């Protein structure tokens, strides 16, 4: 892999964002997974704040349940929002190996993991983010489960998904603006991400995603990325802020071939 250093035609994208997918964790009732990884989530936000990085925190509903059960945790979430971090939605639909129990699919009510439909999930999530709005998300099972609230869709996994021009697409029956993301795991190729970043055009947005568990396994790789972005003179900001600012400069065109989780993306 070529080094990102001393690249003769160094450029930068329009802006860059960093999404954290907060996972279900297998057992949708005990919330033990959330309890285990909550300290890592706290440490991740502390690290981001050191680099003035505003993260896009996309939670499965089990995390909303866990955080709202504890007043100090919930107050900390509200502090993160006030500091400029965005709280969004990560929805694992019925076909995902780690289903969160919510779906609009018919005939699933008898499943032991069934928690309710998407309207039930969104009622919980709106309470979770109040007084802010849910605007961004990564949603599986878009055909049946895409919520009307989510206007900005993040989707992808491979490195070539990181560099995209925002585009207007239809997911299910919902019109949204979509941007790509590439998955930086705890053992990811950080040099590959750097090299792809410096190839970005000025009308592209660069998106990265990881999990709370990947940060827990290897915080250093995430800090390396934060350091690289800061040294590049760029700043990690939120999906919603980027798309708002992008539309002031560029026209977002309609795209007929959206990235969709089940078609193009391996379940994380």
Image (cartoon, rainbow, N blue to C red):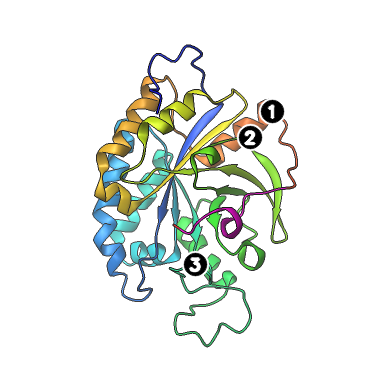
Q: Which residue is mark 2?
A: 165
For image coordinates 39% across by 60% down, the residue present is 23
Of residues 71 and 65, the one drawn nearer to the viewer in this rendering? 65
Q: Which mark is residue 250?
A: 1
Q: x, y (%) of residue 215?
A: 30, 47
Which one is earlier in the sequence, the residue at label 1 or at label 3? 3
User: At which x and y percent is residue 71?
Assistant: 30, 61
| In this picture, residue 202 sits left or right of residue 79 | right
Residue 100 x, y percent position in the rendering: 46, 70
Disc 3 target residue: 96
In terms of secondary structure, what is the magenta stretch mainly?
A: loop
User: Contact, CB < 8 Å: mark 2 with mark 1?
Assistant: yes
The segment highlighted magenta reads: 257-267
Q: Is residue 165 left or right of residue 157?
A: right
User: Quick one: quadrant of the N terminus?
Assistant: top left
Name the quadrant containing residue 28.
bottom left
Q: CA distance from mark 3 to mark 2?
A: 27 Å
Counting labels gives 3
Q: Secondary structure at mark 1?
A: loop
Residue 24's label in the rendered image is: none
Q: Are marks 3 and 2 in contact (CB under 8 Å)?
A: no
Question: Which numbered mark, 2 or 1, is in the foreground of this view?
Answer: 2
């Amino acid at each position: 892999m070529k080094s990102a250093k001393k690249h003769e035609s160094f450029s930068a994208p329009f802006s860059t964002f960093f999404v954290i997918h907060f996972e279900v964790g297998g057992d949708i009732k005990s919330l033990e997974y959330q309890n285990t990884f909550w300290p890592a989530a706290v440490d991740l936000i502390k690290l981001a704040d050191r680099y003035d990085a505003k993260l896009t925190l996309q939670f499965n509903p089990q995390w909303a349940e866990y955080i709202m059960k504890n007043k100090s945790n919930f107050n900390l979430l509200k502090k993160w929002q006030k500091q400029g971090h965005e709280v969004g939605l990560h929805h694992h639909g019925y076909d995902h190996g780690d289903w969160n129990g919510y779906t609009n699919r018919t005939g699933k009510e008898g499943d032991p993991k069934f928690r309710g439909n998407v309207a039930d999930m969104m009622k919980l999530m709106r309470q979770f983010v109040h007084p802010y709005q849910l605007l961004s998300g990564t949603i599986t099972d878009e055909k049946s489960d895409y919520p009307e609230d989510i206007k900005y869709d993040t989707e992808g996994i491979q490195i070539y998904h990181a560099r995209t021009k925002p585009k207007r697409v239809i997911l299910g029956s919902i019109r949204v603006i979509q941007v790509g993301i590439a998955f930086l795991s705890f053992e990811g190729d950080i040099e590959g991400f750097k090299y792809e970043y410096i190839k970005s055009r000025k009308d592209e947005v660069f998106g990265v995603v990881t999990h709370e568990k990947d940060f827990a396994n290897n915080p250093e790789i995430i800090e390396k990325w934060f350091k690289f972005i800061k040294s590049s003179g760029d700043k990690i900001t939120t999906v919603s802020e980027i798309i708002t600012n992008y539309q002031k400069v560029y026209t977002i065109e309609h795209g007929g071939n959206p990235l969709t989780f089940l078609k193009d993306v391996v379940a994380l």
